[in-house]
């Protein structure tokens, strides 16, 4: 059975051209890039090229790029550096909908003596910029707001957010893990101090990330050790993966228009098709400002996990908006922050597409998913007895 992979916000397939670029650096060119001899030096030069490619995608100088092990490390490094370089400032502003790579660190920092303000979102997942203005204080070290949300795809107005923070004297970090290759940004114009990305969300391998640190911004390393990355991130470089990330950035930039037209078109057809064939379904997250590949749809009165299991029988891979905490399924912190009603939040599914998806795959989901929802609603404990509103108009399941 073919896999229909629509979970690209969780991770992506490595692009064959990225893999091809990486392969020699496992077996033939395995020298340490810090070595004096040519066998290592040629690897060092390839890392320089990867840094240039990554910087070109960011719109920054190559010296402003630090390679890390993942998006989480990039986020942690930026936030800890902002606090370490300004010991007199102990306050952080962030949002309730950040990835755990930011949220759990900020919670830890609160336990370590910092103060934090968590900005809320409205029912569409949008921030209120007046709330941001009011939240920034003279002792605010950092404003950390994600560029786009991984669950709903909502894109935040990072240009305005950064301008507001800079005017008030705070450093700015943005988690752009979900936007690289999907939404263009140019760090020559975007006044953030730190920007985090992750390789495995852009068709590079897992275990590599990058952090932009603006020239002139004081930086305190997170990892102590060797002199790699100009002393900013110790540890022998993950050479093949860094080379892969550079190549993936180059391909992502060449495909960014296609991401918004072709991938966006597939997402829209999937979303419209599901909304028109399944009643009591809704999209979570404003459609005004959203990643082109992401559709977060709630199907009322059914469990997201049950939908995932039944879709798995057809090879369809997506995510649900619930997380298993203490043995019970809780709606995600993002859907809770948006105030999505309980019966919708439990039945939320995130489809996240990529340039490797096809129209035929969208057709398959549109064919197989509506009968799955009908079947689950028939046995749903939330549905009132005798409620006819979910009677199917004649699909394969209901004919029996
Ligand atoms: N930030 C966002 C918005 C993400 O979606 C993710 C991963 O899902 C991360 C950070 C963490 O990235 P990594 O898995 O590379 O640590």
Image (spheres, rainbow, N blue to C red):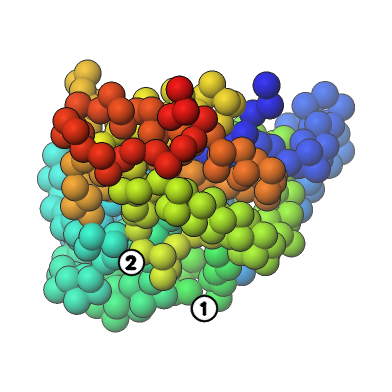
* Residue 174 in the image, given as x and y percentages of width and height: 40, 59
Q: Tell me what residue is drawn at x 45 percent, y 62 percent.
A: 290
Relative depth, front residue between 398 and 9: 398
Which element carries disc 2, helix, strand or loop? strand
The answer for how far apart the CA atoms under marks 2 and 1 are is: 16 Å
Identity of the residue drawn at 87% across and 27% down: 28
Mark 1: few, some, or many residues within 10 Å (few <14, many ≥20)? Answer: few
Q: Earlier in the sequence, mark 2 or mark 1?
A: 2
Residue picked out by circle 1: 189
Which quadrant of the rendered structure holds the C terminus?
A: top left
Q: Residue 76: image x %, image y %?
A: 37, 44
Residue at screen point 46% across, 37% down: 394
Disc 2 beta carbon < 8 A from ligand 1? no
Comparing marks 2 and 1, which lies closer to the viewer? 1
Q: Which quadrant would residue 237 be assigned to in this image?
A: top right
Question: Which residue is identified by label 2?
Answer: 171
Q: Is residue 186 left or right of residue 221?
A: right
């Amino acid at each position: 059975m073919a896999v229909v992979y629509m979970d690209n916000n969780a991770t992506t397939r490595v692009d064959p051209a990225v893999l091809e670029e990486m392969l020699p650096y496992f077996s033939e060119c395995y020298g340490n890039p810090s070595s004096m001899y040519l066998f290592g030096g040629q690897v060092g030069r390839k890392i320089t090229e990867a840094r240039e490619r990554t910087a070109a995608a960011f719109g920054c100088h190559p010296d402003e790029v630090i390679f890390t092990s993942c998006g989480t490390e990039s986020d942690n490094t930026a936030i800890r550096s902002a606090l370490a370089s300004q010991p007199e400032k102990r306050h952080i502003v962030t949002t309730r909908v950040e990835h755990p790579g930011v949220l759990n660190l900020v919670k830890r920092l609160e336990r370590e003596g910092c103060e934090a303000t968590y900005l809320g979102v409205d029912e569409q997942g949008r921030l209120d910029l007046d709330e941001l203005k009011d939240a920034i204080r003279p002792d605010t070290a950092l404003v950390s707001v994600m560029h786009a949300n991984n669950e709903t795809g909502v894109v935040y107005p990072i240009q305005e957010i950064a301008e507001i923070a800079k005017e008030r004297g705070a450093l700015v970090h943005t988690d752009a893990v979900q936007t690289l290759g999907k939404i263009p940004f140019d760090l020559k114009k975007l006044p953030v101090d730190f920007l985090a990305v992750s390789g495995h969300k852009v068709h590079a391998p897992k275990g590599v990330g990058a952090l932009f640190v603006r020239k002139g911004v004081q930086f305190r390393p997170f990892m102590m050790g060797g002199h790699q990355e100009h002393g900013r991130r110790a540890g022998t470089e993950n050479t093949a993966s860094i080379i892969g990330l550079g190549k993936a950035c180059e391909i992502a930039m060449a495909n960014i228009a296609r991401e918004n037209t072709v991938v966006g078109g597939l997402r829209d057809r999937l979303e419209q098709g599901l909304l028109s064939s399944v009643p009591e379904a809704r999209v979570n997250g404003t459609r005004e400002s959203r990643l082109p590949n992401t559709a977060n749809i709630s199907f009322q009165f059914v469990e997201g996990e049950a939908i995932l299991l039944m879709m798995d029988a057809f090879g369809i891979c997506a995510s649900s908006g619930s997380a298993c905490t203490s043995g019970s399924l809780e709606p995600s912190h993002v859907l809770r922050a948006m105030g999505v009603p309980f019966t919708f939040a439990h039945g939320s599914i995130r489809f996240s597409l990529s340039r490797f998806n096809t129209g035929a795959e969208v057709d398959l989901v549109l064919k197989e998913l509506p009968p799955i929802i009908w079947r689950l609603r028939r046995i749903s404990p939330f549905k009132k007895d005798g409620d006819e509103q979910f009677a199917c108009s004649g699909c394969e399941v209901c004919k029996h």
